Image (cartoon, rainbow, N blue to C red):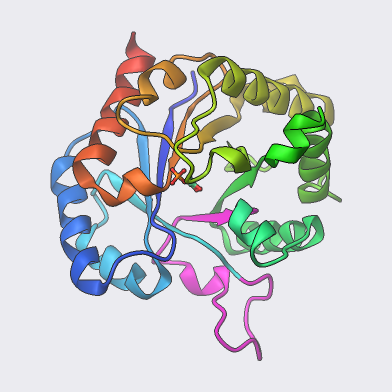
Amino acid sequence: MRIPIVGGNWKMNTTRAEALPLLVALRDGLDGFDGAEVVVMPPAPWLGDAANVLEEDSAVHIGVQNVHWEPRGAFTGEQSAAMLVGTAEYALVGHSERRHVFGESDADVNRKLRSILDAGLRPILAVGETEAERDTGATYEVLRRQLEGAFAGFTDLPTTIVIAYEPVWAIGTGRTATPEAAQEACAAVRSMVAERFGAEAASALRIQYGGSVTADNIAALAVQPDIDGALVGGASLNPEAFIAICRAIAQARHA
Ligand code: 13P
């Protein structure tokens, strides 16, 4: 039985004055919640605040949106996974905005993934096709290339890893993938992981769907057999919406 996992990726949003009450609302609104694992990913400047607000027994875990692949060094403006030990538990890697806005390659994703694992953090690896790739029927080819690139040189699937299927055309557009399309792609990711690392590893792997998830559309996505939660962008900035998404995901699993 896979425990669903919900991520809230705030991206480059919130002032400190906005971030603090949002963190408090999540802590209080999800007090005692155990229907899914919850990970909040605030911008890096608020990670220390997040750690202060979300004490160790909080139901809300902390993730970082991006890391450099080296543990330390002359990399002005960057943060390493190693530095986040003790503050964050999860680290996002391969997000479409990192790939498409900042030009990160599959090789970069591979290096970052290794650094996250070396530091003992839990990676959330995002993959997904663009609209043009979907339109030309290249979706599975792209997912396979991204997975092969991320896992180049790996002999086993890292046990702590979560994969997020986030079709680029659904991110921030309001055009959520249909539950059927999201299920089909998540099932394809699982079978690619099974081919590469074996059926047992693949069946234990948690796969999130991300892309315009809201409190209104999550229930139909969350009941799909290969979808184990969600990675939420815009709606994670609204505590009521995000908490409703967490509860709907927990509900779907018990249904
Ligand atoms: P939206 O939920 O705003 O579409 O963003 C999804 C996302 O990119 C989460 O990482």
Can residue 131 be found in the magenta stretch?
no
Residue at position x 51%, y 37% in the image: 210
Observer-nearest residue: 145 or 167?
Answer: 167
94 over 180 or under it: above or below: below
Compared to residue 199, the image places residue 152 above or below, namely: below
Q: Residue furthest top?
A: 255
Q: What is the x, y in percent for residue 95?
A: 60, 53
| x 68%, y 58%: residue | 99
- Considering the image in quadrants, where does the C terminus appear? top left
The main secondary structure of the magenta stretch is loop
Q: How far across and down, in percent of the image, does residue 69 sit? A: 68, 70
Closer to the camera, 84 or 255? 255
Q: Is residue 163 visible?
A: no
Q: What residue sits 42% from the left and 47% below the top?
A: 233
> On the rendered structure, is 141 left or right of 225?
right
Q: Residue 102 vs residue 107: left or right?
A: left
Image position of 3 (left or right of 101): left
Residue 223 higher or lower than 111, as above or below: above
In this figure, what is the number of numbered marks?
0
As displayed, is residue 248 above or below residue 70?
Answer: above
Q: Quadrant of residue 14?
A: bottom left
Q: Position of residue 174 (x, y in %)?
A: 44, 37
Query: Horizontal and vertical percent for residue 3?
Result: 44, 27
Q: Is residue 117 visible?
A: yes
**Which residue is located at x 49 percent, y 30 percent?**
176
Residues drawn in magenta = 68-94
**Where is residue 216, by image quadrant?**
top left
